[in-house]
Image (tube, rainbow, N blue to C red):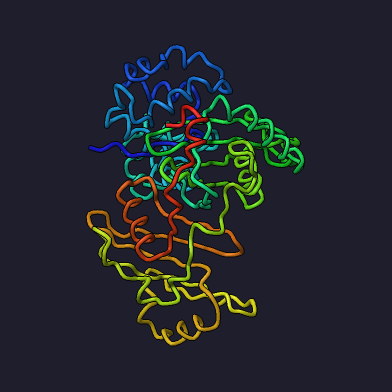
Amino acid sequence: MPRPSFLISLQTLEHVSRALLVRLLAPHADFAKTHGVPLDALAATAQNDRALVRILHTALHAEDSLPPPSDELCDRMLALSDLTGTKGRDELLALDTSDPPRLPRGTLGDEDLAATAILDAPEIAEDARVACSGTHADAAMRGVTELDPKEPRPFPADDAFRAPFVTLFGARMKARDRKDLCDLHRRETRDAIYLEIAHGRPPAVRDFVRGDSTLTIEQSTDVVTERARVRICKKTWRASLKASHAAIKEVLRRTLGEVAHADPDHWRADGAYSLAPFSDLASALKSEGVPDLQRVELHALSVLTDDGETMAFSRPRKSIIGASADHVHTAALALGKVVAVKLVLRIANVGAIGVKLTVRDGQNRIEYPRDNPEVERVVREYMIARGILRMAPAKTSAAVDDNIAGTG
């Protein structure tokens, strides 16, 4: 079967304890060793030594991996991804009805609980995946801001980009009362460059309980890390950004532009998407001309009136078109502009896919499951056909092509 473009996030792999990760990989030791990750060496590394884990993550996702990961290994990584998180934890513990329970209580993080279930209670893990499948398509860039380049210029090679980016991003985060940490991981495919940046949140005081039997509450001032992610398309050189909030996206946007192209405003969010086509709902919701797209439904609509009032309409699990408030929708559209929609696209051989898009104040945010190439194709073709997604110019700067090597 075709290998999914996204299996598991780097963060999940890094957080699984080494002993459990080695057990998960044991049936696939030859694959790991061939790609430079002998399991005995991996087992001997400290938990904060992430070098071999990053090599493994790259091998799992590289299009030219030889040998490629087997279907069984791909499914195991997808299972770990699906079950990691609050939803996975809740499903696993609810399904573990044995007395005494088969899964530990109150001692494992999300990643280790998921790994333990896969290894020691596989039937519980399989049942839990039914409810959780696709929950962690997070690293596949769900919920992103799309940025158009001023011109489609190739992205610099890693050796030219890494050091100045780490230094500048760290300095800007420190100026925002954060640590100057910038831990950058980069991987490339035929179509895109992916950057994952671990950075620090502001210091916070926390109460915690030590992992012993005393249950003593202690206090600590800590800096917790979080991740920002970037995808650079090699066809259009458009950037897709995902971060915890808008201020971090802005730091990331300016730093990327300044380091890559000596222009902090090289990438901009004010032209990639437009919701203007939704002023004519019938036209915007057409499926004609997009192969495999059977129907488009509008489940939510937000309109910003000319005097600043937001009017929102939604209908759970149903299209708002044809509802009793149709005449109100028409009146609202005459008073202002559409700033957010929630769509459901019915795709042949895939099913119903939710798409959320917000365009407001020069910014945009789009969310849909991009880990499925067929979904990605249909959503993109629909948005281009209806004028929702504006394509970047096709020309390329020859001078930049000559001066920047290793961009593919």
Question: Residue 134 location, x and y as percent?
Answer: 38, 47
Specify the farthest residue to the front. Answer: 399
Q: Quadrant of the image for the N terminus?
A: top left
In the rendered image, which quarter is residue 356 located in?
bottom left
Q: Can residue 260 be seen at all in this image of the molecule? A: yes
Image height of 164 relative to 6, above or below: above
Image height of 74 relative to 329, above or below: above
Question: Residue 236 location, x and y as percent?
Answer: 44, 46
Horizontally, residue 342 falls left or right of residue 184, namely left
Residue plotted at (37% across, 34% down): 190
Question: Residue 125 location, x and y as percent?
Answer: 36, 39
Residue plotted at (59% across, 46% down): 266
Question: Residue 235 location, x and y as percent?
Answer: 41, 43
Count of all numbered marks drawn on residues in the image:
0
Viewer-side residue, 90 vs 350 = 350
Horizontally, residue 23 falls left or right of residue 11, namely left
Q: Can residue 88 be seen at all in this image of the molecule? A: no
Viewer-side residue, 157 vs 75 = 157
Residue plotted at (44% across, 59% down): 390
In the rendered image, which quarter is residue 50 located in?
top right
Residue plotted at (62% across, 78% down): 309
Q: Quadrant of the image for the C terminus?
A: top left
